[in-house]
Amino acid sequence: MAISINEYLNKDLIINNLEAETTDDIFKALSEMLLKANFVKDSFYMGLVKRENNFPTGLTLGKYNVAIPHTDAIHVIKPAIAIATLKNPVVFNNMDGDGQVNVNIVFAMVLNEPHSQIVMLQQLMLLIQNEDILKCMNDAKDSEELYDIVSKFDCNLV
Amino acid sequence: MNKQKVILVACGTGIATSTVVCKKVEDLIKANNINARVIQCKISEVPGYEDDADLLVTTTIASRTYKIPVVKAINYLTNINTQKVDQAIIDALKE
């Protein structure tokens, strides 16, 4: 019943040390990767850009900050989480509209069903609240290592 | 018995962060024996619900003023000072 974060991960959907200057650079890289792997429609990119403009997704956590861009289900073919660590931090607006944040790691949530992905979402929130994990992700050498870090992150919620 | 209160939980898409916050709010009202139910929606859908609701809990920018109290719940995502949000929700429902 419980569908964990692991089932949303995919080795082809991880970018280590992405060189990006703007949020659009990041969204382009993630969208192209997701489109190639057939997880999203080509409208996904604009969906991400528009959604981020209206409802930003930066989260100020502390030493390492994250963003969780996502968009409407109509742009999605099958659900996944795509991950990019950034070579240099990129400025996002904070989700609650309260200032900006230098983001180190981006988790694009590719979701197609409202309400049903609660376990994965809760796990993802626990993951981003764990500074040790974020540090390991930030320091990872390659996407293989990144995948291992996230897929081994185990948390029993229920 | 008091009339059941209605809590709106809203984010930008009504899919992701509001799902996490919904769960938190449902657990909170259960733990505190508050007679309330939760409706999850997009922030853009709030006007359609607000006449019948008592409280808006949101993770995103509340860009206009609403007729009902608004509690920002981004702390439920970052797990920083969540007690403050718990208390704000409880206080808002007591009125």
Image: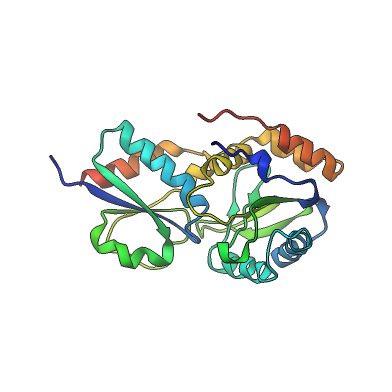
Vertical side of A40 occupied by B84: above or below: above
Nearer to me, B3 or A74: A74
Q: Where is residue A73 drawn, in percent x and y? A: 56, 62
Residue A63 in which image quadrant? top right
Q: Position of A136 compared to B53: left or right?
A: right
Nearer to me, A126 or B37: B37
Residue at the spot 76% in from the left edge and 40% down from the top edge: A137
Residue at the spot 76% in from the left edge and 51% down from the top edge: A13
Q: Position of A27 compared to B50: left or right?
A: right
Q: Where is residue A148 drawn, in percent x and y? A: 78, 36
User: Looking at the image, can residue A126 be seen?
Assistant: yes
User: Looking at the image, can residue B85 be seen?
Assistant: no
Q: Where is residue B67 drawn, in percent x and y? A: 27, 63
Q: Position of B23 compared to A18: left or right?
A: left
**Position of the N terminus of chain A by quadrant:** top right
Residue farthest toward the front in the current orientation of the protein? A1
